[in-house]
Image (cartoon, grey):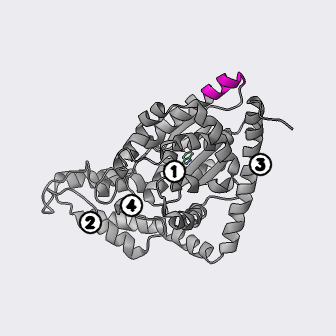
Amino acid sequence: MTHANRHTILTGDRTTGPLHLGHYIGSLRARVQLQHEANQFLLLADTQALTDNVGRHQKVTANVIEVALDYLAVGIDPAKSTILIQSQVPELAELSQYLLNLVTVARLERNPTIKEEIRLRGFERDIPAGFLTYPVSQAADITAFKATHVPVGDDQLPMIEQTNELVRRFNHTVDRSVLVECVAVLSQVTRLPGIDGKAKMSKSLGNAITLAATPDEITKAVNNMYTDPLHLRVSDPGRVEGNVVFAFLDAFEPDVQKVDELKAHYRRGGLGDSVVKRVLNERLQALIEPIRARRGELEKEPAEVLAILRSGTERAREVAGKTLSEVKGALGLSYF
Ligand code: TRP
């Protein structure tokens, strides 16, 4: 593949906490692969994180570094991928400003992701305007880099739809193809459940295993995993559906045949939770151990990590700046 027809990929993570195994399965693992085939931008979405973390800006800032460490520790290579800090690319805010005129408040209020998040946060009518409009800032993130592919979880699909609406609206308004539509790329195992059995793993729900988890934390999390509440004795037949240990084995154990055998045995009865948990614990320890080790090394070199973020952000500003001049030119905003 020549450089010219490479896909451009943009991904983003709100910097509200260190990343966990849900992120690993949902996106990180794929990003490490994709960086070899595509022109990949990884956005540390600190500006977006502020939209629902007013007053908690120190946490947001601290987590920029945590997420960057996670990226580097799992194998994101700054020579292949561009890691950028959203707040340090003012072109993104500027582009958002123009896009905001192309969407109605009613349309934003209908965005299913926003609706669900408003419900989760109990905002009722007291929604920060910046929060309601974050789909527009996300559209700016994507279009500033002319991304063609955006890997996301299924909860973010409405964001991609809204981005493409804005692209069409903008191009139609200026009667020129300036911005580029994108497609969502869904991962195969889109969503990992929390260790408590809740649908989604999330740091704020306290049901996550982070990529920096210690061996003890991993063991404790596995031992606390929700299984089948009716599987009381080893000899009882057990349920695999909704059983978090098996959901994790599906996601992390590459030996599919071994997982199938464990499932069959569990369903029949005669296989205790502790045995299955031991298999999973070994798997997760082996997965996280090298990530944790690499993270530990990087933590000792904060200047190096900052230099990576600085150069990625500079590279990103060049690309976003080019798009922005096209956008402003098309809108007639080029006076000098
Ligand atoms: N909204 C995403 C999240 O909730 C983060 C994000 C910001 C993003 N900008 C993006 C994702 C652009 C994809 C593309 O984590």
Q: CA distance from mark 1 to mark 4?
A: 19 Å
- The C terminus: image quadrant: top right
Residue 173 at what x, y percent from top left?
66, 24
Dot 4, crowdedness within 10 Å: few (<14), some or many (≥20)?
few
Q: Nearer the viewer, mark 1 or mark 4?
A: 4
Q: Quickly name the residue at label 2.
A: 275
Q: Which residues are magenta?
A: 168-176
Marks 2,3: beta carbons within 8 A: no
Alpha-carbon distance for marks 2 and 3?
54 Å
Image quarter where the N terminus lies is top right
The Cα–Cα distance between marks 1 and 2, rounded to whole angstroms, is 29 Å
Q: Is residue 222 above or below residue 335?
A: below
Q: Secondary structure at mark 3?
A: helix
Disc 3 designates what residue? Answer: 318
What secondary structure is found at the residue carrying circle 1? helix
Q: Which residue is mark 1?
A: 27
Of marks 2 and 4, which one's residue comes earlier in the chain?
4
Q: Is residue 171 magenta?
A: yes
Q: Residues within 10 Å of mark 1 (few under 14, many from 20)?
A: many
Mark found first going from the N terminus, 3 or 4: 4
Q: Amino acid at mark 1?
A: Ser
| Sooner in the amino-acid sequence: mark 1 or mark 2 | 1
